[in-house]
Structure formats: C-alpha cells, structure tokens
Image (cartoon, helix red, strand yellow):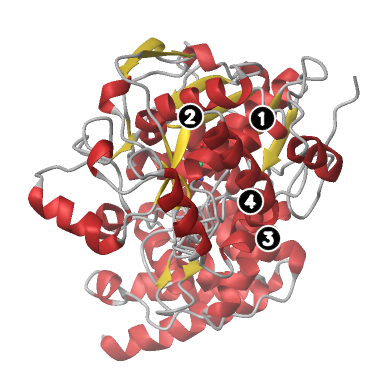
C-alpha cells in the first residue's frame, strides 16, 4: 500500500479511516527538532551532531524539524540561526524547511490541521477530553491544593467533558467557550520504555498529569506534535536530551493510543551537559559567569539587542567544536581524542554513549581548538583570520607571506583571535619596544655589532633564513660576543617583546628593508638611553 501523505491522508482521517502508515522500509530517519527560541546551546548542537553521525553511519536521513508551536516563545531569526549553525558545523540536514523532502512541511505551525485531527481522534476514542477550566479557576485550585496537578486524582473536580453533562458541553462549544484538549492518563498502569542508553525504564501512570495536548489557540503542545510528527515523518530513532525523559511516558501513551505503538521510534536520551564543577546543568547563566560561550555562534536577541558571543566568534574552528562536543558523552573506548567528522561518522556508536552527565570543561575545549589549529592548513582559514587583523586596523597585503606567518605562529595559538596577538608585528611596527629589557646590559661592543650587522645584512644577495642566521653567528664570533647576548636584543628590535618564533624566521618574513629599519630605529633609541 502506498503511503499517503498530506491532503490525501487527512482526507482519510476525516472520513474515519484508520490511519496507520506502515514504515515503507527499514530506513533510518532521525530528526533534530529544536524550538526557535534563541541561540543554539552547545547541548542542542551535540544532539544534532549525534543524530547526524548516526544517520550518516547507517546510510539514513537526518531531518531538521522546527518546533515552533509555542508562539509565546517564538523568536524571529532563530530558525535561520539554527540553519546557519548546522551549516557552520558541517552537519547539514537532508530535509529541512529550506530543503523540503517528501515528509513536509518541516515547521510545525505549518502542520497545524494534522494535530487537531489527531487530538479529536483521541477524544473520540476516549483517550483525551475537553477541558473548559478558566485560568482563574486553575489558579484557585492551585491555591487550595498544594502541588496541584490536573490528573487522575483531581480531574473529577474540574470542568471538563468527563464531568460536565453532555448538554453543557454542547452549550460550551456553541458559546465558543475556550477549551483545551487533555490526555486522559490511565490509572494504575506501568508504562515501559526501552532506552538505547538507559535500558528498560518503567514509569507509573499515576505520576503523570493530564497533559494539555491541544491549546486554546488550536496549536498543539510539544507532546502531541512530537508524537504525530515523528510518526508522519517516519522517524526511526529519537535521540534527544535527558531533560525530555520525564515526558517520554506521555509520548509512549500517545504512541499507544494513536498508533497502537506501531513504528514507534527507538529512544535514546542523551546525558546532560554539566557545569565544569559537575554541580548541575550547564546553563547560559553559568557559562556567562565563568566567562565562556555557550552558543555555537553569536546571537543577538532581537528584542533586547543583547549580544551573546558564540564559540565561532570566540575563535573556535568548527572541527574542534564538533570534536569537543562528540566527546561530551561518548568515546571510542581508547585514549583517542582527536576525531575528524568522517572519523566520528565511522566510529560513533550509541552503545558507547554514557548515562552519566558529561562535565563541560572550557580549558579542554580550548585544547581541542589548539590541536585542530596545529592540524589545519592556514591557507584554508587565512581569509577568516585576515578579517580579524582588519578588525584591529591591521592591513595584510601579501597573501603568501600572510599564510607563511600564520603557519609560523599557529602552534602558539589556541583561538583564532590569538593570531592577531601572536603575529601583529609582522604587519605593523610594534608600538612599543621593551628597550628596558636590554638597555642595562647594553655595551659599546654590542652597539658596534649591530651597526656592522646592518651593513652585512644590507649586502646579502639573498634574504633567506640560513644566510641571516649564518651571517649573524659568524659576526658574533668575530666580535667575541656570546650569541645568547645578542639574540634577545635582535628579537626585541624586531618584535617589540621577548616572545615569538625563531628570530631569524621572523627577520626572513619581515624582509630586508623592514628588518634593517627596525634595527636602526632601536639603535638610535638605545644610544639616547646610554
Ligand atoms: N522541541 C524540543 C526541543 O526544543 C524537541 C525535543 C525532542 O527532540 O523531542 O528540544
């Protein structure tokens, strides 16, 4: 039987036909289902990543579904931000609002009629009911009853289609009284769930409340929408954060009532990402307090205009960000820590995802970036780093030299932003020279040495590292000055400070003219301080 989708399928539903979509084949289809409410937390990106890795490894599909039914939390721009983040991370979906496949639409607000029909079906079959309680009435109950829940114990005392006479219900509809549809949680049932990470789990139905499935505005809640869509989109596995585990029994009940559990996806609830100290979930506030990013990329709240810096803008490479996230909850059983995306695809396994929360460690995140910088060919990221130089008012003209400089200093950099700090002096004369560090030991002999060095260097036919070094060494020997006494002055004259890569390498890249000018400049300063 061909699978019916869209209008044709809805038509069947309206006409009371049973609607069970057989899974067409054993296709692996996983989804990342974020709500567009703001910047994407690194935990969200990890969920997307694990879904992606599994899909790629199994030859399946990775779907992006935008869960935007909560209009009060909807934030304009957040959907585009999610798409941009996935693109930056290199984990782009096979199907999404931007790239619709055969199971669309991919935004829940555009699937609104579906949910209404399924909610009505639940009511018709006795698994859900209409509730007419006003916000004031609910508030009153909360005041009267501590820890009030709309559930098995209290539903009989509320205004709903289970307690109201049929004519009153009819009248309430005729009067357009606002209502919601609630799930009628069964009494005394054990709800079972087989989690790929946590094993067999049991929940007692009496502990669940009668969740709202359809809201007053006709929009579904997350619980109804997620089940209906996972079914209609033929999702085979649901990998999502542990924070959704308490909702899972409600989802299992809905799967049972709506679809007889047929084609229910396999579940896996991913471990929480904890604060560095391990005490509780890593929140935006906790990250801000500790001074590290939590969003993948910069996020500006459209209302408050508050900017929250992302990992990208802090100077992380996507490869490092992804690598670090993959290891927050998973390892391959060896000491290996550096994995490229294709390696992760090949080696990832849900069986090796652990249950315990994973501590986020910002220092370790930086370590990943440092390792990735060392592995990365600077030609691939030079344009990005050039922008960082330009943002600091430093212009870079010669591309080849720029790349050589970046290669020279990359081992000293942890974040992309460090390149400016480590290499600015190649493109801009130092604003200050640490003359004090050499002035006290300055001698007439050293002065003579450098005067002669300028002469010898200017006569060199080639400006290359070995010539520069050899000339320098030979001259030091001829002047009977220890080379160690001369290298620091040379470095300070060229760089301004004491650090940096090999000084002859620096001189080679600075070029003859600039090297000689800097030595000259400093010699005249030194002569004034004597
Ligand atoms: N919309 C939920 C979220 O924002 C999705 C949870 C799920 O994957 O079921 O994370």
Residue 364 sits in quarter: top left
Numbered circle sitting on residue 505: none
Mark 2–mark 4 Cα distance, whole angstroms, equals 23 Å
**Residue placed under numbered mark 3 in the picture:** 382
Query: In the image, is the residue at mark 3 within 8 Å of ligand 1 by its beta carbon?
Result: no
Q: Quadrant of the C terminus?
A: bottom left
**Residue placed under numbered mark 1 in the picture:** 231
Secondary structure state at the residue bearing disc 3: helix
Q: Earlier in the sequence, mark 2 or mark 1?
A: 2
Seen as rendered, the residue at the extreme front is 167
Q: Does 324 sit left or right of 229 as displayed?
A: left
Mark 2–mark 1 Cα distance, whole angstroms, equals 18 Å
Residue 250 sits in quarter: top left
Residue depth check, mark 3 versus mark 2: number of the one nearer the observer:
2
At x 65%, y 53%, the residue is: 112
Residue depth check, mark 4 versus mark 3: number of the one nearer the observer:
4
Q: Earlier in the sequence, mark 3 or mark 2?
A: 2
Q: Where residue 424 sits: x, y (%)? A: 52, 71
**Residue placed under numbered mark 2 in the picture:** 127
Numbered circle sitting on residue 108: 4
Q: Earlier in the sequence, mark 4 or mark 3?
A: 4
């Amino acid at each position: 039987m061909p699978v019916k989708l869209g209008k044709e399928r809805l038509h069947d539903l309206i006409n009371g036909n049973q609607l069970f979509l057989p899974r067409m084949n054993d296709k692996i289809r996983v989804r990342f289902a974020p709500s567009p409410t703001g910047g994407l937390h690194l935990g969200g990106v990890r969920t997307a990543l694990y879904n992606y890795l599994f899909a790629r490894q199994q030859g399946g599909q990775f779907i992006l579904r935008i869960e935007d039914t909560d209009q009060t939390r909807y934030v304009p721009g957040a959907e585009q931000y999610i798409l941009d983040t996935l693109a930056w991370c290199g984990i782009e979906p096979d199907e999404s609002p931007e790239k619709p496949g055969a199971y669309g639409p991919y935004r829940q607000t555009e699937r609104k009629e579906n949910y209404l029909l399924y909610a009505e079906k639940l009511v018709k079959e006795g698994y859900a009911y209409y509730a007419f309680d006003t916000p004031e009435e609910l508030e009153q109950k909360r005041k009267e009853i501590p820890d009030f829940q709309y559930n098995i114990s209290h539903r009989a005392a509320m205004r709903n289609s289970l307690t109201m006479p049929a004519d009153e219900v009819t009248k309430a509809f005729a009067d357009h009284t606002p209502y919601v549809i609630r799930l009628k949680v069964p009494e005394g049932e054990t709800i079972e769930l087989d989690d790929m990470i946590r094993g067999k789990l049991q929940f007692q139905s009496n502990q669940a409340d009668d969740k709202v499935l359809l809201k007053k505005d006709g929009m579904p809640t997350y619980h109804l929408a997620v089940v209906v869509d996972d079914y209609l989109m033929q999702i085979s596995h649901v990998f999502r954060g542990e924070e959704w585990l308490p909702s899972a029994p409600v989802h299992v009940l809905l799967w049972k009532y709506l679809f007889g559990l047929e084609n229910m996806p396999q579940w896996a609830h991913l471990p929480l990402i904890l604060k560095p100290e391990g005490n509780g979930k890593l929140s935006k506030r906790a990250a801000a307090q500790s001074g590290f990013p939590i969003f993948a990329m910069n996020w500006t709240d459209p209302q408050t205009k508050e900017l929250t810096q992302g990992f990208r803008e802090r100077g992380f490479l996507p490869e490092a960000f992804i690598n670090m996230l993959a290891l927050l909850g998973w390892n391959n059983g060896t000491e290996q820590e550096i994995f490229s995306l294709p390696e992760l695809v090949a080696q990832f396994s849900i069986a090796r995802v652990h249950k315990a929360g994973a501590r986020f460690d910002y220092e370790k995140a930086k370590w990943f970036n440092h390792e990735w910088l060392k592995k990365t060919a600077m030609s691939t990221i030079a344009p990005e780093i050039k922008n960082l130089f330009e943002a600091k008012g430093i212009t870079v003209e010669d591309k080849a030299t720029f790349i050589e400089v970046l290669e020279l200093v990359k081992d000293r950099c942890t974040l992309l932003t460090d390149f400016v700090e480590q290499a600015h002096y190649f493109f801009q004369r130092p604003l200050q020279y640490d003359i004090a560090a050499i002035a006290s030991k300055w001698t007439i002999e050293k002065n003579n040495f450098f005067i002669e060095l300028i002469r010898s260097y200017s006569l060199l036919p080639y400006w290359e590292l070995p010539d520069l070094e050899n000339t320098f060494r030979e001259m030091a020997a001829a002047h009977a000055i220890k080379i160690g006494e001369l290298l620091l002055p040379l470095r300070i004259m060229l760089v301004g400070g004491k650090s940096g890569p090999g000084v002859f390498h620096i001189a080679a890249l600075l070029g003859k003219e600039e090297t000689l000018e800097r030595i000259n400049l400093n010699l005249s300063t030194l002569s004034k301080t004597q």
